[in-house]
Each structure stands twice: as structure tokens, then as C-alpha cells.
Amino acid sequence: MIDFTTFFSMGGYGAYVWPAYGLTALAFAGMLGWTLLTLKSRRREEQALSAAGRNKRSRRGVKS
Amino acid sequence: MTTARIPLLHRYANPAAFGRLAAKVLPWTTALAILLLGLGSYFALFASPPDYQQGESVRIMYVHVPAAIMSEVVYGMMAAAAVAGIIWKHALADLFVKAAAPLGAAFTFVCLVAGSLWGKPMWGAWWVWDARLTSELILFFLYLGYLALVDAFDDPQRGLRAGAILVLVGVVDLPIIKFSVDWWNTLHQPASLMTLSGPKVDPSMLLPLMLMIGGFMAFFVSVVVLRLESELLARRIRAWRTATSEE
């Protein structure tokens, strides 16, 4: 069984070690999360625009 | 239909073609990132010894040093891509610079703050204006400057070009960061990894450090590939919009 109190105290340096790791984890989550959100919304928009472009061309095709 | 409509662009500058390439690369780099970061964190926090002088505070090294290395490596890659973009006008090279910049800025920020959190208990100061810390702070401002400049033009192509020039001017900061600890009398310690006589770090600490450096690198590759696809899509969307408004 791990002694968690000792582990989290980090020999008295817990107040420095944990924020450093917390910030790193936050930065990684931020980079990945922001990238994925932007990517998904752009994929949706690109699909909508290309579908709209196809419809317009096929409508013109029907008319003439 | 899509490939025939954009004959001018290079093959992988097409989002669909790039997406297929990305789908081949991403499973490997993502798995590698998870594996290395997982193992690295385990060794960094549990299965490595405290330092004989610095005690447990030495564990900050396992995030500070990889972040510092990434801050320089990413900038170096951006500079190489900027050259390629200016000489060969390859669209992917220009967009790589833009895709990588926020990641480089984030690594630099982590390096600075983790370093500060290590400096306080070891040096007694959050910050000193020594050459290593100052030149790394300048690198952070170079990233921020690039990010501000690249979006400051109505024509995205001009933004990319201006940004590439800024990146190339700023590249002079890289050797200054690297050799600052030798050229000046800094509070920051000199190199322990990349020395002429090899790493001067004990194997028990070198292992977690190397795992974390590899993990940071694999994470960067995975995310930058996704960001490149995202930038290509943004360009495609702009092209669709321009085409619609001209009809």
C-alpha cells in the first residue's frame, strides 16, 4: 500500500512539484482539446459548403 | 471531383489527401505518446530516486527539461519550414509554421513556469534576469509575436509570409539560449544532457527524462498533424466562400 500522505508531500516540495505537473497536464489537455474542437467544427463547415456547392451546380443543370 | 477542382495545389495540400496520410500516421504517434508519457510519468513520480541535494524537487526536471527542449526544437522546425515556404512556396510548409506556433508557445510557457516553480525552493527566487531565463522568455515573446502577426493581415498569405520572416529573424535566439550558460555566468546550471562527454545524469534519472522527452515529441507530432489538417480545411473553407461570393 502506498503511503499517500508522504507521496503528496514530496519531501516538503509538494507545493512546487504538483503545480508543475498540473500545469503540464493542463497545457497538454488544452493543446489537444482546442485542436480537436476547431478541427471538428471546420470539418462540419467544409462538408456543408461543399454539399451546398454541389446542390447549386446540379440545380443549374436541371434548369438548362 | 475534389482533386480535379484544385490542380494547382500540391498533392498533400489537398485536405482529403492529407487526411488519408494523417489517418496512417496518427494511430502510431498517438499510441507512442500515450505509452511514453504514461511510463515516463510513472518513473518520474514513483520509480526514480530523489536527488541527493535537491530531494524530491528534482522531479520538476522531468517536465521542465522536455518542455525546454520542445520550445527550441519546435522553433527550429518552424524556421526550417519557413525557409521551405519562402523558397519553394509549398503551402504545407507555410501552414506547418502556423500549426506548430501555438504548441511551441505552450511548451515554452510550461518550461518557464515549471522552471520558476523549481527555482523558488532551490535558488530562493521565482525569477532572475540571467541570460538563460531571459533568452527563453524572449523565445516566448517570439512565439506570441508570430501568433499576433500571422492573423494581422486581410490576406492570409501575406500573414504567413510576414510570420515566416519574423520566425527567421528570431532564430538567432536559439544558439543564444543553448550557449547562454557557457557564455555568461548564469544562475541556471550548465548543460547536463548534451555535453561533449555525453549525459552527466545518472541512469535512474536519465530513463524517466528520456521517456518524457520522447512522449512530448510524439504528442507534438500527433497534435501538429491534426492542426495541419485543420489549417488546410480553413483554407478550403475560405476558397469556397470566395467562390460563392464571386458568383
Image (cartoon, rainbow, N blue to C red):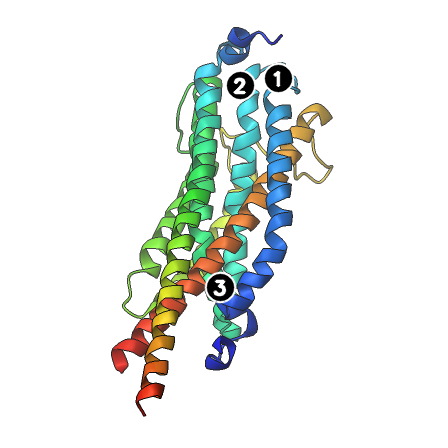
Q: Which residue is mark 3?
A: B82
Q: Is residue B246 visible?
A: yes
**Residue B231, position in %: x, y?**
43, 61
Please identify the quarter of the rendering in which residue B152 is found: bottom left
Q: Is residue B131 visible?
A: no
Q: Name the image quarter holding the C terminus of chain B.
A: bottom left
Distance between the alpha carbons at the discs numbered 3 and 2 = 38 Å
Q: Is residue A1 above or below residue B162?
A: above
Q: Amino acid at mark 3?
A: Ala
Labels 2 and 1: the sequence-earlier one:
1
**Residue B132, position in %: x, y?**
48, 37
Distance between the alpha carbons at the discs numbered 1 and 3 = 41 Å
Distance between the alpha carbons at the discs numbered 2 and 1 = 8 Å
Labels 1 and 3: the sequence-earlier one:
1
Q: Which residue is mark 2?
A: B57
| Residue at left offset 66%, top offset 20% | B47
Q: Which residue is mark 1?
A: B51
Q: Name the residue nearer the viewer: B154 or A4.
A: A4
Circles 3 and 2 in contact, beta carbons < 8 Å: no
Residue at the outermost front position? A62
Labels 3 and 2: the sequence-earlier one:
2
What kind of element bears circle 1?
loop
